[in-house]
Image (cartoon, rainbow, N blue to C red):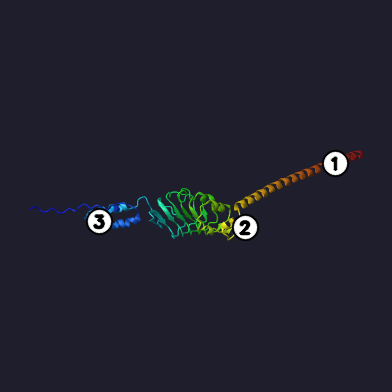
Amino acid sequence: MGEALPERPEAVLLPRSCCHPRGAASCHAELAGCKMTLTTTTPATSVAQAFFCLLLCIPWGSSCPPSCQCTEWAGAKAVLCSSRHLEEIPKDIPRDVVFLKLDANSITRIPSNAFRHLSHLEEIDLSRNAIEKIDRAAFKGVAAGLRTVDLSSNRIRSIPKEALLALSAKLRLANNPWHCECALQEVLWEARLDLDSVQDITCHTAPREEYVGKPLLQVLDAGVNFCSVRQRTMDMAMFVTMFGWFAMVIIYIICYVRHNHEDSCRYGDYLRSLPSAQAHAETTSTAL
């Protein structure tokens, strides 16, 4: 009888899940399945299959900021950067992020086009930061898709109305040291505010002391119109300016007339002095 041929290991296919990169969160479970499968293969085959499995599980084209955690939430990409001592909005946020949490940091400003490359973004949580300035084009490029923007518990005193009125998202603006003015009033009237927090939009400063410490909605309900106050202020400033120019013209005319009068008087005195000098000269010549 011939010698028995050595048994050749059968080709073992990797589970499809091992070669389907769905993000870092799912790769850990898939790699565990890969390890169980690779134990039935020869060492050389195991090394090759492990290499390709790891290669395919790498989330190419998607990065995560070093200080943040990227995961999936409700089937969508979520980037969690809460309480990471950030002083500015990270630059390397994945483009496919849907939920972005940047709360409880030290961010002081939202610059123009801060989220422009995040076309899938729906919710931004920027609460409990130190934000003082929001540029006019801060949410440019993502305004249409945003559903929620949380700016509560910051240091915002005023905000360009153009930055928020372009949004259709629900806004949370509570617990900021607001200066009650026309722009804030227009935001309150025209923007889509979160009804649960609108009562916490309080006047930290205001044109009149009696409004300080009161909810802006309560002040407006009492019949106060900050936009008309601003218009009256502008009208008064224009009136004062026009009065100043008018007073300057009057003063100039008075000075001009007085100066001409003095010149005329001096010239008259000069003319009156001429006959006396001539007569004195004639008297002197006669005496000689």
Give the amino acid type for the residue marked by disc 2 in the picture.
Answer: Arg
* Residue 93 in sight: no
Q: What label does residue 37 carry, if any? A: 3
Is tag 1's residue or tag 2's residue first in the polypeptide sequence? 2
Callout 1 crowding tier (Cα within 10 Å): few <14, some 14–19, many ≥20: few
Q: Secondary structure at mark 3?
A: helix
* Residue shown at the point (46%, 54%) measured from the top left: 148
Point out the residue furthest to the left here: 1
- 131 left or right, relative to 255: left
Q: Secondary structure at mark 1?
A: helix
Residue that badge 1 annotates: 272
- Residue 56 in the image: x percent, y percent? 31, 51
- 10 left or right, relative to 141: left
Of the pair 136 and 123, the residue shown nearer to us: 123
Is tag 1's residue or tag 3's residue first in the polypeptide sequence? 3
CA gap between label 1 and label 3 equals 129 Å
- 79 left or right, relative to 153: left
Give the amino acid type for the residue marked by disc 1 in the picture.
Answer: Arg
Callout 2 crowding tier (Cα within 10 Å): few <14, some 14–19, many ≥20: few
CA gap between label 1 and label 2 equals 67 Å
Q: What label does residue 208 carry, if any? A: 2
